[in-house]
Amino acid sequence: MIDEQLIQEIISGNTLAFKTLMEKYRERVFHVAMGFVHLKEDAEDLTQEVFIKVYLSLSTFNHDSEFSTWLYRLTINTCINFVNRNRGKRFLQSIEDVWQSAFGQHDNEKTPLEKIEVSERNLLIKKAIDSLPAKQRSAFVLSKYEDLSQKEVAAIMNITEGAVEQLLQRAKNNLRKKLGPSIGN
Amino acid sequence: MRIDDYIDNFIKGEKQIRPNPFLSTRVVAEIEKRQQAKAEKTLRWQAVMVAISIAAISLLGITIGNAYVDSVSQEITMNINDNEIEKLDYYLFENNE
């Protein structure tokens, strides 16, 4: 069933159609959410929040763009709001993450020192991604986590393809600048 | 390894994480829970509104009742038709004797 049909079914009260739509898009929403929060539990909460919003506001979807574009837009806005709401909490969580990934997992191929190194590097990358300005971060997440083309990202963010290219380039430069002194070789 | 490769590896690792397969069931349950709560809230408000309406109508009735001013004069006029009055002489036996 195509999206249009599913949407009509959902508006007329078919919960099963909503479940079908969710099955189709949940991984995409989840991956975008992961790009913003880097934590499975938070990403699942965000995915839930996004789909509840979709269900409640589906009747306002005016079919000007594709459903997936509208959904990505909704996801990005929900993620940005979530990140702004939980700034303090996230710092403590990231410290806990390093500890967990260094000592919680059983990876026999790596020595404890290597594990700590990887965890610390990952924490630095997370922090660098999180410190990007909202627009650069949105473009970066959509492009890297969802492998969307610049054209698709431009449609979602309602900007030109040239602007997307610029945002991605700036995001890349910012990440290199931030990570260079600590993990660059 | 270059910085870009580290970033790509990190993203690759995050992309491998899969959401809970029961996530859609959880979402549908949450939507139903919210809709139920909304319906209960609406019902509660309906009851409150009915009670308020009854109270308002009663109060309005009392107010209107109290505001009524009797336009009829309170003076009592004695209208006695002498012809219709029974003659008391009949009862005064003293005079008939």
Image (cartoon, coloured by chain):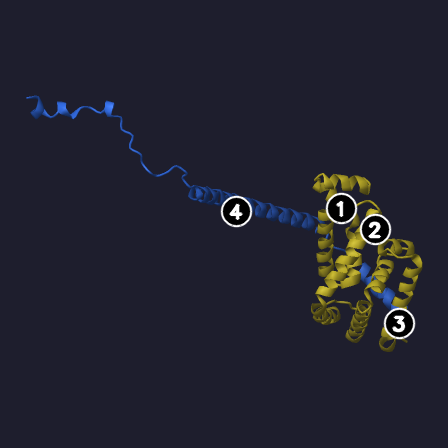
Question: Mark 4 and mark 1: span between their CA atoms?
Answer: 31 Å
Secondary structure under badge 3?
A: helix
For residue A122, above or below residue A139: below
Letter of the chain shown yellow in the rendering: A
Residue at point 86%, 62% (across, down): A140
Given the image, what chain letter belongs to the residue carrying mark 2?
A
Q: Colour of chain B?
A: blue
Determine if residue B48 is in view.
yes
Q: Quadrant of residue A105?
A: bottom right
Q: Mark 1 = which residue?
A: A60
Q: Residue at x 57, y 46 (%)?
A: B40
Q: Are marks 2 and 1 on the same chain?
A: yes
Q: Is residue B31 left or right of residue B70?
A: right
Q: CA distance from mark 1 to mark 3?
A: 41 Å
In the image, taking residue A125 as reference, residue B73 lies left or right, namely: left
| Few, some or many residues within 10 Å of mark 3 (<14, 14–19, 20+) | some
Residue at image mark 4: B48
